[in-house]
Image: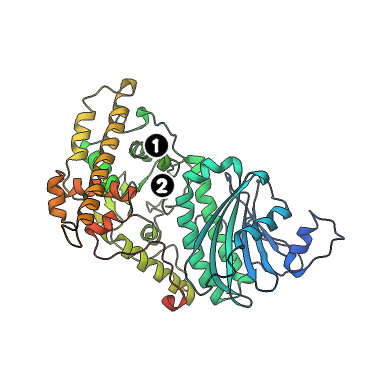
Amino acid sequence: MAAGRPIQPASLISPRSLSSDSGVLTIHSGNSFKADFEDSSTPLSPSSAFSVSSIGNIEHSFIDALLLCQWDNILGPRLEHVWYVTGRPQPHTNILRFVTSQVLSGEICRDIHSSQVDFKFFDIPDKGVIIPAFIFSAHGSTGISLQSLALIIPNSELTLYLHQVDLIHSWFTRIVAKLRVLCAKKDFGTSGLADLSSWLWSCMDMLSSLQEGGLPLKIELNYTAFHFTHPHELEFLRLIVASHLMTFGRSVVIGDSAEKVNVLVYTLGLFCRDGERFCSRAALKGRNWPYFQDLCVQGCIKNLDGSSNLSVRDLLCSQYPTTIIDVERREVTQSSPAADHRRLSHETLIKELKELYEGEEGYGGGPSRTFQPVNVPESLVKELIDEIFKLPPENGVREAYIRHFMHGLQRRAFCIIKYIEGDVLSGSTGNRVSSKRLRQDLNLLLDGDFRIVLAAADKLKPGIYQYMLGERRYDNEYLPNMADVL
C-alpha cells in the first residue's frame, strides 16, 4: 500500500457507525445513511440496504465515488458498498441505484466461471456523470456471482479521464484480481473490505499526485538538462534518453532533492506525447511518494537513510519495463529486459495472488531482483544530443528540434509496422519476419536503434515488440482463475 495511515477493519452489516482514527475509512450502516436522502417513512427492501465508507487524505480528486455492485438472482442488481471521496460532492442515492442497474444490465447470460474482466463505459449527460465500470465474477455470500467496481466521475472531467483511462484500467485490473482472491478466502465484510479500501486509497493517492505534481503540457527548456543552467554529462544524458525510449517511455528518477530530480523528469517529459504527460509527475519537496505502477515519468525522493520507495513487485507488474535513474550515483538501469517483461509480469501477478491467498501479503517488498544495466550501442539519441547543443537555446529552437526527432521516430515506427504487415500478408517469410533483414532494410543496424524504434512501434500497435524479439506471447489482460492460483 502507498504511504498513508492504516485502515481499520469494518463490517458491512454493523448496526451502528464505525470510524477509524485515521480518517481514511468511515463506515456507516446502509439504512442510517439512506435516511439522509429519502423520506424516513419509505419502506426499505433488502435490495436497498448498502454500506458506506469515505476515502480521506486525498487532496486532489476528480472521482466523486466508487461503487461495489453485485448481481442477485432474485433481487437483481444490488448496491453493496459505496466509497465517497472526502471533499467531493456526494452523488444522490437515486444516481447510485441508476449506476448499479446500468453496469450490471445485460449480464444475466454471462458465464460466471470465466476469469475475464470486462470493461464498460457510460457517458450520461442528463445526469452529469460518466461511469467507467469493471465487470467480473467472484465469490459472494451465496456462491460465485457477478460483481462490478464502478467509478462516478463528473461529466466535466471527461477529457482528463480519457487521458488517464489506460492508467486507471491497469490499476483496477490488478485490484480486481486481488479482490477475487479475497472474496474466495475470507469474509469480505470484515478484513476483506478494509483490504479493498486500502488498495482503492492507493489508487486515489496516485491520481491525486498527478493533479498535484503533474507535468505541464508545454515544458520550458530552462527547466531541463538541455539548458546551460543545468549542465549534465552528455554521455549520462544520452544514456537516460536512450533507455527511456527503449522502455516504451516509462522512467522513474530518484534522488536526494526534488530540484535535481525534476531537471531530469522535465527533460524526459520533452520525449513524451501530450497524453503521456497527463500520466507523468514531478517530485515535490516534502511529499515522499513511492513508485506508482504504470506512470510514464515520475520523480521520487529518497528516504533520509538513502533508500528509495521502489517496489520491485510494482515495477514488474507494470505494463512496460521501467528505466530507473539514480541522480546521485549517476546510474541508469532497467527493471527487466523488454522481451521478457510480459512473462515476468505474468509470473509476478500469479505469485502475488498466491501469497494473498496463503496469508503472506508482502506487497511492498516483492521478489528480490537485480536491475539490468543499460549497455546497448545506439546512434539515434547520440546524434540528437550532439546536434541539439549546437542550436541556440532561445526562441524554442531546441524544443522544436526534439519534437521533430519524435515525429521522425514515429515515422520509422510506422515503417516497421507496414514492413511486418506486408511480409506477413505476402507470406514470403513464413511465420516469422527476419529481424536481421528488417534492420538492414530500414538502416537500424545498431541494437539500441532497433529497440528504440521497435518500442515506438509497439505503442502504436501493441504486440510488435513481442512478435519480433519475444519468445512467447503473454496477454497482459489475462487474469488467472482460482484453479490457476491454487
Q: Residues within 10 Å of mark 2 (few under 14, many from 20)?
A: many
| x, y percent for residue 51 | 70, 63
| x, y percent for residue 456 | 29, 46
Q: Is residue 463 left or right of residue 1?
A: left
In which quarter of the view is residue 328 placed? top left
- Name which residue lies at 73% across and 67% down: 47
Residue highlighted by disc 2: 300
Residue highlighted by disc 1: 259
The C terminus, quarter of image? bottom left
Per the rendering, the mark at residue 120 is: none
Q: For the residue marked with disc 1, what is the amino acid?
A: Glu
Q: Is residue 231 left or right of residue 308?
A: left
Q: For the residue marked with disc 2, what is the amino acid?
A: Cys
In which quarter of the view is residue 312 placed? bottom left
Q: Is residue 359 visible?
A: no
The secondary structure type at the circle numbered 1 is helix
Q: Nearer the viewer, residue 431 or 143?
A: 431
- Outermost residue toward the front in this view: 426
The secondary structure type at the circle numbered 2 is strand
Among the two numbered marks 2 and 1 on one chain, the one whose residue lies closer to the N terminus: 1
| x, y percent for residue 341 | 31, 60
Give the answer, above or below, for where 110 lies relative to 332: below
